[in-house]
Amino acid sequence: MNDYYTLGIESTCDETGCAILCNEQILANVVASQIDLHTEYGGVVPELACRRHIDLIIPVVDEALQQAGIPLSKIDLIAVAQGPGLVGAIMVGLNCAKTLAWTLGKPLIAVNHIEAHLFAALMHQKTPAAYPCIGAVLSGGHTALVHITQPGVYQLIGQTVDDAIGEAFDKVARMLGLPYPGGPVIEALARQGDPKKYPLRAGSVKGHPLSFSFSGLKTAVLYTAKGKGAKPGSELLLPQSELPHLAASFQQAALEDIVLKVHKAAEMKGCKTILFGGGVTANQRLREMFAAHSQFTYHWPEKGLILDNAAMIAGLGLQKFRQQSKGAPLEIEAMPNMPFT
Ligand code: KG4
Ligand code: ZN
């Protein structure tokens, strides 16, 4: 069989990505991060993200082809993230993908960015996942639990009613005067702190045991750091030496809630296998906490596939194209709220 080359494009938020696969093998996975651009604002500024994608998309595609060592003419399939995300940002990647598909006369396949995060957990696995299983999406924009009955078939069984888990890390970091993105900074600070120092808890939603709520936890951190009734921009009252303890206590409370609800979902659905996706799965403490439960099989995304990247888009696109044997029409539009269940 001839080698089959897929070019994937990701631009849903603040990373511009292009990846090239030869069959399932990743030849290149280029990600141009915009963190420097957004850090002074404490979060992603959609208009700035969109403009930066426009500047970066063609150089990133060129770089991926160069790293893969193949000419554009060898590409057989173009995969792109159609959503969810920032509409202007998605449009940049989508228009680039459509242009490539049209000029090369090759099929275009559009995938869901969140589904791709879960797919990433399977990309380097030697053994296929056992179905049915639970998917846990832990990203900056989403916190969701899905029951996966077979590859590509998802039922949403739990999600956040307010902030996403990554968003909670980002907002807590910001209120403590720490840079964006907050997840890695809080994790590093928490390593020097006592997670039991402050009695914090994530929220629960009455009658919905698999729903998440992090906004109360975030407010509890705010009041601990800056006094009751304080605003996020208020002055810090707590001494700097307490910040590692507060970071550790917040992280422990947030992650304990994830561990509890993921396992609850697995038990409710009778699943022994769990797939993880999204930027928060970079957190080593989270992985350690799950590792303590040996009765389950966990699939984590490997390095390079954890944060937003185009290899997961290309991989999922290739799988979908093989299943459907037809591409998407060039008329498809960006879907900022694209569902995958
Ligand atoms: O999946 P992702 O790259 O983008 C979205 O699709 O949202 O996730 C980014 C999120 C950010 O909120 C970031 O703070 C969080 O993942 N994150 C972490 C860690 N590394 C990234 N959260 C906790 N611990 C980390 N080590
Ligand atoms: Zn993402």
Image (tube, rainbow, N blue to C red):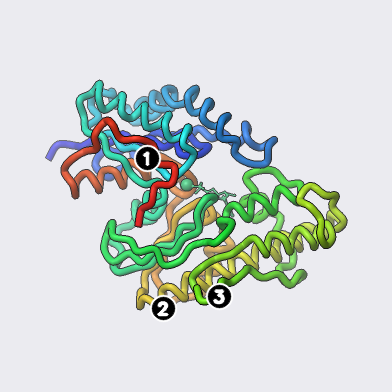
Are there few (<14), some (14-19), or many (20+) residues within 10 Å of tag 2?
few
Query: What residue is disc 3 on?
Result: 206
Which residue is rendered at x = 48% and y = 71% of the image?
Answer: 210
Residue type beneath disc 1: Gln
| Image quarter hosting the C terminus | bottom left
Query: What residue is disc 1 on?
Result: 82
The answer to whether the residue bearing label 2 lies less than 8 angstroms from the nearest atom of ligand 1 is no
| Image quarter hosting the N terminus | top left
Residue 219, position as x, y percentages in the image: 72, 60
Q: Quadrant of residue 275?
A: bottom left
Q: Indicate which disc residue 217 carries.
A: none
Image side of residue 167 versus residue 262, left or right: right
Earlier residue among tags 1 and 3: 1
Front tag of 1 and 3: 3
Identify the secondary structure beneath mark 2.
helix
Which residue is rendered at x = 39% and y = 41% of the image?
Answer: 335
Q: Indicate which disc residue 267 carries.
A: 2
Are there few (<14), some (14-19), or many (20+) residues within 10 Å of tag 1?
many
Residue type beneath disc 2: Glu
Instruction: Look at the picture and state if 190 lies above or below 78.
Output: below
Q: CA distance from mark 3 to mark 2?
A: 19 Å
Q: How many marks?
A: 3
Q: CA distance from mark 1 to mark 3?
A: 34 Å
Residue 50, position as x, y percentages in the image: 51, 30
Q: Quadrant of residue 43?
A: top right
Front tag of 2 and 1: 1
Residue 152, position as x, y percentages in the image: 28, 56
Q: CA distance from mark 2 to mark 1?
A: 33 Å
Residue 191, position as x, y percentages in the image: 69, 60
Which residue is rendered at x = 73% and y = 46% of the image?
Answer: 178
Instruction: Look at the picture and state if 218 lies above or below 23.
Output: below
